[in-house]
Image: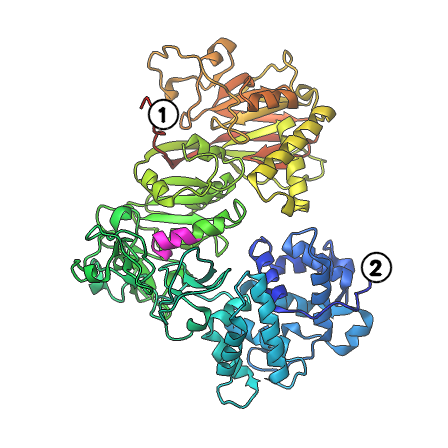
Amino acid sequence: MSSPTNPEVKELNPVDFIQLQQYIEYNNLKVKDVLREFYADGSLARHRHGECINEEGFRLFLKTYLEVEDFPVDLCQRLFLSFQNSEPGQEDSTSEIIHTHRAYKQLTAFSEVFLKDVSCYFSLLEDGQPRDKLEFAFRLYDRDGNGVLDSSEVDRIIAQMMHAAEYLDWDVSELKPVLKDMMTAIDADSSGTVSLDEWVQGGMNNVPLLVLLGLKMIQKDGQHLWRMKNFNKPVYCNVCHSMLLGLRKQGLCCTSCKYTVHGRCANKNPAPCARTYVKSKKEIGVSTHDWVSGNCDSRKCDKCQKKIKSLQGLTGKHCVWCHTMRHDQCVDQESTQCTCGLLRDHILPPWAIYPVIKERPNNVKNGCSGSGDDSELNTTPDGQVLQICPVPNTHPLLVFVNPKSGGKQGERVLRKFQFLLNPRQVYNLSNGGPGPGLSFFRNLKEYRILVCGGDGTVGWILDAIDKGNLLVRPPVAVLPLGTGNDLARCLRWGGGYDGEDLNRILKDIEGSSQVLMDRWSVQVITDENQEEGDPVPYEIINNYFSIGVDASIAHRFHTMREKHPQKFNSRMKNKLWYFEFATSETISASCKKLSENLTIECCGTPLDLSGVSLEGVAILNIPSMHGGSNLWGETKKVDTKGLTAQEEPEVIINPEILKVASQDLSDRRLEVVGLEGAMEMGQIYTGLKSAVRLAKTSQITIRTKKALPMQIDGEPWMQPPCTIHITHKNQACMLMGPPAKPSGFFK
């Protein structure tokens, strides 16, 4: 039974629009996935009445689609009412997309809305273009449905956009007259009302309006990637040359080139953003500086080495590609040729990318890379496909950023790399995954990949490389944004990114060395006559696999995080929650006498588990688990007599030999250890002891007799009785960070 809607709920406003888009940015489902649940035998089918759903069904739609347990009740009610109260719009050529907010009057009495309208609306937010969203916004504000926005409706839009600006933390002290000027300019025929065509045409060229409506613009070459920003020192507008004033976010700054303007100046024909590719193959290799004026105050000129002093206006110039800074007069003394500066080895400059016609032969010449992906990320506005012809003796860096990792860190890292490198070599994994980037770089022979995310993101990229049909398998570095970051720790990239200078990290990548890392296939076969358990998260092991006590803790942690994601928005909070679940597992001992409920065979040799009391078993590929714990422990140094991994036996179970056996990322062997309980795990995590060494092997078969918690690379699930086969799959090429420099007096 649906709860009655609060009659005092206010109408939908731009802040709601922005919040919705932020929710959608961080969900993983598509509208079509949720719709299936409302039909046939879906879990939500009972909430559908014909073609309609009630308020409870609408709430469950939001909960399922946005993957949040505590979606704001008032926002849910406003959304539901908006579908009931809106008048049907006049049909036009885009009505199949834009009439999404329509609901018929007779539905109001029954507190139901059309499921098709709801699904179309969220599909629009999910995939719609700015033009479509502007049309939708017009229908939202045209409350009387007469096809134009009159003065009262325009005033209401301005008032609501002021609220949106405050929500976005803009400085609104001078915003209202700017918004009025914007709305006046949109009324092209000065009729006193705004038609749909005027609204769309004016809005498409009105950057602050698009930002306030929560609409993301598709970046074309030469178009700025605007972001509202707060400046902690005097900054001057690149258009009107006057200072940006205000206590909070005072202006718009381009993420790519740092061109800075007042909100009111963004529509006054600002200079274009730096190009990201050249227009023809003839320009390949012709390197030139791209200078942006201003805001170099107090920096040192790289030409004359003197300080760039403020002249109460735009001061100095900086190059987008080599990031050098110059006095205005020193620019004229500088060669026009750009070397790309200290990051030359990583940057894919515009003179290394050019367009070719789409109907081109598939052959690749001169080491140039053609993109087989038709994504708009790799094509020009006129449909030509971009192709890479790299600068000789460089290793362009392909950057993948998971903005969902590390709270807001992923978004900040994405913006920083878009500034330091060419935006066309930096990919947001929320926009199409790794496919477009790998396709763009597919035929290059010398390049590196940087994955900015947690261990799960690294595994995602490695899987994509396996399936990518690439000319070479590029080496992969990691910028750790997750919680555990075990793989990043083993590869010397650290336990977590804390805002360090990305220039230094790029320098470390340049000085890194290549290592091979084993990857393992895992096959889980549920016993006959058993109900299917949770889906197995991965088919490949990169880090570790475990059964029992540690997987039980991880499963509790995972379940709580799914229900209440807002409680898990920092590494410190995550670790505190993990400690709490470990404490409760110590008390409950849910995996006691584990050895009675499973058997393990290593290359056909059964392990004798009768002599140890275990609550967990872990199978290790790397020497780190759960945020830096070394379960295998330190190995005694002995003379190995030059034995290589290939000369080692397929399986070692002798305790004396295991004492001197060491771990290696590329030895084609797995280490098997036993865990005695949650209390002992705490001692392992603090380095007081190590787990019980059971075996070192190249193949494992596990049979379980009851439902047990399991995990692969930190992703847990509950598994009914089953048989598990683990075999070697392949080796991935990874980048090992340079050794840490000694610190202190004795270097």
Q: Is residue 418 covered in magenta?
A: yes
Q: Amino acid at mark 2?
A: Met
- Residue holding disc 2: 1
Q: Residues within 10 Å of mark 1 (few under 14, many from 20)?
A: few
Q: Tell me which numbered mark, 1 or 2, is placed earlier along the sequence.
A: 2
Residue 13 in percent (x, y) is at 64, 69
Give left or right: position of 39 versus 628: right
Q: Is residue 632 covered in magenta?
A: no
Residue 39 visible in image? no
Which quarter of the figure is the C terminus placed in? top left
Query: In the image, which disc is placed on residue 665?
Result: none
Residue 9 visible in image? yes
- Vertical comparison of 124 with 40: above or below: below
Q: Secondary structure at mark 1?
A: loop
Residue 359 in percent (x, y) is at 33, 66
Residue 311 in percent (x, y) is at 30, 63
Which quarter of the figure is the N terminus placed in? bottom right
- Residue holding disc 1: 744
**Most frequent secondary structure within the magenta stretch:** helix
Q: Amino acid at mark 1?
A: Gly
Residue 703 in percent (x, y) is at 63, 26
User: Magenta part of the protein: which range?
Assistant: 415-423
Q: Residue at x 55, y 17 (%)?
A: 689
